[in-house]
Image (cartoon, rainbow, N blue to C red):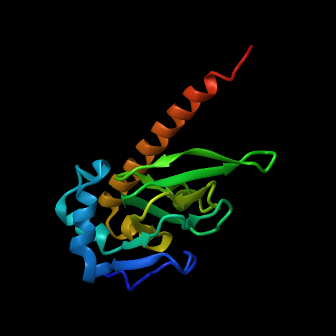
Amino acid sequence: MENNRLLPDTLPSDIELLGDGHSFQDTIAAMLTEVKGFSSFEPSDLLFLARHMQAYRARKGITIFREGDQNCYLCVLVTGHISVYKEDQGRETKLLGTITPGKIFGEISIIDNLPHSATLVAESDAIFLLMNQESFRQCTEHEPVLGVRLLGLIARLLCARLRSASGQLAEFIHI
């Protein structure tokens, strides 16, 4: 099934589309092979996913998502670094961490359909792959085995993040 150019309309206008769908699928699939989480996926599965993704470039300093944005995307960072910022209860912005090449981001919003929980800023020129929610739905509905593998990848990622966060929080618990 072809993607029909389901491009996001809520990304900042200064983020450059590099390619998408069938016309760029081999390049996107090659980018996915470099991502550890996709190493066990079959080449045909990567091509199917690639047809449902777009590749973008964000220049240094560009905000990719803002905390509270309603868009739902699963993204994979190919090159560059992206900083993750979150407002605390006092509305002060705190740096939570940095996303490095090969990491997945934005996956929470594609699962729960809620606004982004953090702001993401390109700390260097960055190339990332993006799958919007409709494409994610198509992948899981039309290729259920692939959908289960993709959801398993997301579940493992979320579990790792939860374990890390609970380990960090343990230092602040005083009974």
Relative to the observer, which residue lies in front, 84 or 145? 84
Image quarter hosting the C terminus = top right
User: What residue is at 56 percent from the left and 58 percent from the top?
Assistant: 120
Residue 105: x and y, percent? 47, 55
User: What residue is at 41 percent from the left and 71 percent from the top?
Assistant: 57
Q: Is residue 1 visible?
A: no
Relative to the observer, which residue lies in front, 156 or 1? 156
Residue 96: x and y, percent? 59, 44
The image quarter in which residue 16 lies: bottom left
Relative to the observer, which residue lies in front, 135 or 80? 80
The image quarter in which residue 72 lies: bottom right
Q: Is residue 116 visible?
A: yes
User: What residue is at 63 percent from the left and 54 percent from the top?
Assistant: 117
Q: Is residue 76 left or right of residue 111?
A: left
Residue 42 lies, with reference to residue 64, above or below; the image says above
Residue 111: x and y, percent? 53, 58
Q: Residue furthest bottom?
A: 4
Residue 109 lies, with reference to residue 96, above or below; the image says below
Q: Residue furthest top?
A: 175
Q: Residue furthest left?
A: 43
User: What residue is at 26 percent from the left and 81 percent from the top?
Assistant: 22
Q: Is residue 113 left or right of residue 37?
A: right
Count of picture labels? 0
Residue 39 lies, with reference to residue 51, above or below; the image says above
Image quarter hosting the N terminus = bottom left
Q: Is residue 131 left or right of residue 172?
A: left
